[in-house]
Amino acid sequence: MSLEKCDLAIVGSGLTGMSAALAAYSRNSDQTIKIFGIPYDSNTAKKGEIENILGINKVVGVDYIQQIITQIENLNAEFAKENEPNKLEFINEDVTVITKNGTQFQVITESRNIEAKAVIISTGLPELKHTIKGEDNFVHKGVSHCAVCDGALFRGKKVAIIGEGNFVARGALFLRKYCRKVTIICPNSTLDSDNRFLKKLSKSQNISFKYNIDLKTAEIFGSQLVEGVRFQEDGENTELTVNAIFVELKDKPDLIFLKDISLNLTENGYIIKDSKNATSIEGIFTAGSISGEMDYIPILMGDGYKAGIYATEYLKN
């Protein structure tokens, strides 16, 4: 791989990373910016209907991501200079490793090797997989990790969605449009989602809840395809017959690509940042849920935008 160069590398192409790119490019359209990751794989793209963006009544996550990509590409074209490569580039590959060489950072993907003067890490939180007994046996056979992606495939069927929080609430509200029956299997005593979601869920006649389920007791079963899930409920064995199970659990931060860089982290593995989104390593900034921010789109958007501004100021200095 030949060595390429850029001013700013943004690791993570979801809402937070693209907000950072928009801010950085707006502040200085002469700097070269490269955004790493697959936008349609981001958490925002997998959300159902989003209703908490000021000025936008309602938008589906994947459509919103497409709008942002188009906006950035149009901005890039507006400031592009003749006979010069684009200053802002999407690289649809995940970063495998980042190393530090003096004041520069080497960002490596499967096919690219890029040297950057500054880095913003905004990878978000990964999906928690391989946690439910039988889960791995039925992937693409009734087990999915994205209700919005695959929900329509089970039109008229009975399904279950496992997890908690707004992500699961949105997923269940999306599934209710297609599926005959939706059961939310929650590991805690409450779903821990916004009240407006809870009200919609409670009014949905085809949605039911199972609370305080110890997921260690859960087992997905079937012959060729998913036929149901077993678990303990109030100390008794319960068997739920469903055609599909959506596992919507979030994992702790995955920073394996930073194994050669010692960033200061919290006890739970989140990246520690200061008021300017700077980390313990000069030149590396962070934003979004990977740094412990709440998973609300306006917060993630603002935090990414702030990181883009401060990273650009760092490059100017």
Image (cartoon, rainbow, N blue to C red):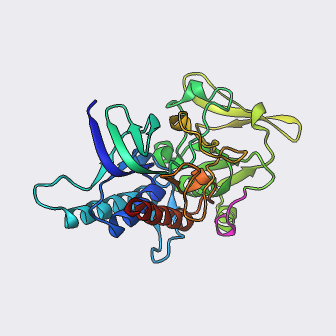
Q: Quadrant of the N terminus?
A: top left
Q: Is residue 17 left or right of residue 137?
A: left
Q: Is residue 43 on the magenta stretch?
A: no
Which residue ends up furthest to the left in the rendered image?
83
Please indicate, yes or no, whether residue 176 appears anywhere in the rendered image. Answer: no
Q: Residue at x 60, y 34 (%)?
A: 129
Q: Position of residue 281 (x, y in %)?
A: 54, 48
Q: Residue at x 28, y 65 (%)?
A: 29
Between 180 and 78, the one lying in front of the other is 78
Q: Position of residue 125 (x, y in %)?
A: 57, 47
Which residue ends up furthest to the top in the rendered image?
223
Among the 4 quarters of the image, the one containing residue 245: top right
Q: Residue at x 72, y 55 (%)?
A: 191
Q: Is residue 209 left or right of residue 29?
A: right
Q: Position of residue 250 (x, y in %)?
A: 62, 45
Rendered view: 166 above or below 35: below
Between 82 and 40, the one lying in front of the other is 82
Q: Position of residue 19 (x, y in %)?
A: 43, 62
Residue range corresponding to the magenta coloring: 192-197
Q: Is residue 106 left or right of residue 134?
A: left
**Across the whole image, how many numbered discs are drawn on residues?**
0
Between 16 and 144, the one lying in front of the other is 16
Q: Quadrant of the C terminus?
A: bottom left
